[in-house]
């Protein structure tokens, strides 16, 4: 009888092992497909989130994942930041104006985390998604495919969506792919990664975001310094420095060579900064009955109606709003009403009556957090960002393929100073993906992986 029991146990165990391997492979393939779709805003990204949520049906694995995640300070800080943001809606006078992203995106973290035993494949899936997105961008700009730039709910238009966030995704994945390329061991990995890198400069040119073109060289120089210290051989160091410097040179050339989209937009930015910040005696508020003076006053207001000028008046007015309720802010959704209120208290010379001044989105993650969640929200956000950047620096010690992770975080953090990323599903998704990659490898490493 004992021999029969032992025999049954021996035949059952391999079957269970094979089932576990099959389930992991299925989880792995669905996860990579979902990760690829996350790079395509709108309906494709929603499908990607649904696929990733489907993998959570592996309940034993999901339970182990959650047990590991709740012991990680980075994950707890991220949840605390988001939770406080949603809690702030309860004391808002305008909760219906709330723009915070739905928390269902947090399902991405436990769904992706078990796959981090192979981060190389996660980066390649992201690179493939960005390459597909770039192809669609090109078709739209050429007029071959119809697309509405600000229509995330439609399939075709939503794929292009808001150009600055498209540039943010492309730059973050560029940093990850460069790190993967310079640490790849096989020629197959090198060539495949290189091919995925090629479309990204096209994506950045089509998006034409000035913030990204200014931040990217700094991020790559930091990456080059890190590579020089990390790579063991002189040949690899030279290759790494060469790749980074070529990208930096191409970026700076696009900014200064006349005729390129980045160059035109950068020149316009310099003019906007100059016209917005200059103060002359001729522009003092004049008499109401003086037509020339009225024209001067109108020009004084109009000088803010540009990308930099609006940010200048939003940040100036937003700081005054925050100082009136510094600790917990006015609650989620209160930004629009508070800008309407502060406009009535500002003189024309400080942006009253400027078209676009009353906004629910002040183009700064820090300012939006300060207005709606106050100093508590700012502390949680800065603590999370600091820990994420520090942790990303350490991740490379155990996982060389994530060498570009800290450069990706640097880009996102600096970009968020001039854009409000927590009000965008697309940008928040990138934030969540980078957070997952930064959390560290799962402790429950499976033989199937």
Image (spheres, helix red, strand yellow):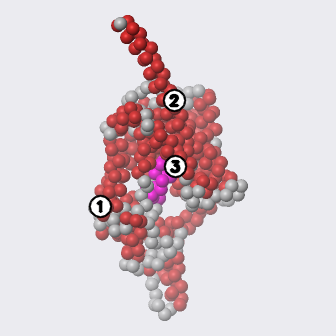
| Relative vertical location of residue 1 with respect to residue 312 in this rendering, above or below | above
Q: Residue drawn at (36%, 43%), measured in percent from left and top?
A: 75
Label of residue 25 in the image:
2
Residue 418 forms part of the magenta stretch: yes
| Relative depth, front residue between 387 and 447 | 447
- How far, Cα to Cα, is label 3 from label 2? 22 Å
Span colored in magenta: 417-430
| Relative vertical location of residue 356 with respect to residue 331 in this rendering, above or below | below
| Relative vertical location of residue 190 with respect to residue 298 in this rendering, above or below | above
Direction left: furthest residue:
327
Residue 226 forms part of the magenta stretch: no
Is the Cβ of the residue at disc 3 closer than 8 Å to that at disc 1? Answer: no
- Tell me the SS state at disc 2: helix
Q: Where is residue 29 in the image (x, y as percent from the top left)?
A: 54, 34
Q: Nearer the viewer, mark 2 or mark 1?
A: 2
- Label 3 vs 1, first from the N-terminus: 3
Q: Where is residue 138 in the image (x, y as percent from the top left)?
A: 67, 52
Q: Where is residue 221 in the image (x, y as percent from the top left)?
A: 51, 44
Residue 108 location, quadrant? top left
- Label 3 vs 2, first from the N-terminus: 2
Judge from the rendering whether residue 88 lies leftward or rightward of residue 174; answer left or right. Answer: left
Callout 2 environment at 10 Å: few (<14), some (14 to 19), or many (20+)? some
- How far, Cα to Cα, is label 3 from label 1? 32 Å
Residue that numbered label 1 is attached to: 328
Residue that numbered label 3 is attached to: 46
- Label 2 vs 1, first from the N-terminus: 2
Q: Residue drawn at (52%, 32%), measured in percent from left and top?
A: 26
- How far, Cα to Cα, is label 2 from label 1? 46 Å
- Tell me the SS state at disc 3: helix
The secondary structure making up most of the magenta span is helix
- Quarter of the image with the N terminus in it: top left
């Amino acid at each position: 009888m004992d021999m029969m029991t032992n025999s049954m146990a021996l035949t059952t165990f391999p079957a269970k092992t094979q089932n576990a391997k099959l389930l992991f492979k299925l989880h792995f393939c669905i996860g990579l497909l979902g990760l690829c779709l996350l790079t395509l805003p709108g309906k494709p990204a929603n499908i990607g989130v649904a696929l990733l949520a489907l993998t959570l049906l592996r309940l034993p694995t999901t339970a182990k994942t959650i047990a590991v995640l709740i012991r990680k300070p980075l994950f707890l800080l991220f949840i605390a930041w988001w939770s406080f943001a949603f809690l702030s809606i309860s004391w808002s006078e305008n909760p219906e104006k709330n723009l915070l992203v739905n928390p269902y995106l947090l399902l991405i973290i436990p769904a992706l985390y078990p796959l981090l035993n192979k981060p190389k494949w996660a980066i390649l899936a992201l690179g493939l998604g960005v390459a597909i997105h770039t192809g669609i961008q090109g078709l739209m700009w050429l007029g071959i495919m119809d697309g509405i730039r600000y229509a995330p709910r439609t399939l075709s238009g939503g794929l292009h969506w808001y150009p600055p966030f498209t540039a943010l995704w492309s730059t973050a994945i560029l940093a990850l792919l460069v790190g993967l390329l310079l640490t790849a061991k096989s020629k197959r990995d090198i060539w495949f990664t290189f091919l995925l890198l090629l479309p990204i400069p096209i994506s950045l040119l089509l998006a034409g975001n000035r913030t990204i073109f200014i931040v990217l060289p700094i991020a790559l120089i930091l990456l080059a310094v890190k590579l020089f210290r990390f790579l063991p051989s002189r040949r690899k160091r030279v290759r790494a420095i060469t790749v980074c410097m070529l990208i930096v040179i191409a970026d700076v050339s696009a900014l200064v060579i006349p005729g390129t989209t980045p160059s035109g937009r950068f020149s316009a930015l310099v003019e906007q900064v100059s016209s917005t910040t200059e103060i002359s005696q001729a522009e003092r508020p004049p008499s109401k009955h003086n037509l020339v003076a009225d024209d001067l006053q109108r020009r004084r207001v109009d000088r803010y109606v540009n990308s930099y000028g609006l940010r200048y008046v939003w940040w100036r007015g937003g700081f005054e709003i925050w100082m009136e309720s510094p600790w917990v802010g006015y609650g989620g959704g209160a930004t629009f009403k508070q800008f309407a209120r502060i406009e009535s208290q500002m003189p024309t010379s400080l942006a009253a009556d400027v078209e676009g001044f009353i906004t629910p989105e002040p183009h700064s993650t820090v300012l939006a957090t300060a207005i709606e969640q106050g100093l508590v929200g700012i502390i949680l956000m800065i603590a999370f960002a600091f820990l994420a950047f520090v942790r990303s620096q350490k991740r490379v010690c155990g996982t060389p393929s994530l060498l570009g992770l800290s450069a990706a975080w640097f880009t996102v953090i600096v970009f968020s100073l001039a854009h409000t990323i927590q009000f965008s599903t697309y940008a928040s998704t990138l934030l969540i993906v980078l957070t997952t990659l930064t959390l560290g490898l799962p402790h429950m490493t499976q033989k199937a992986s």
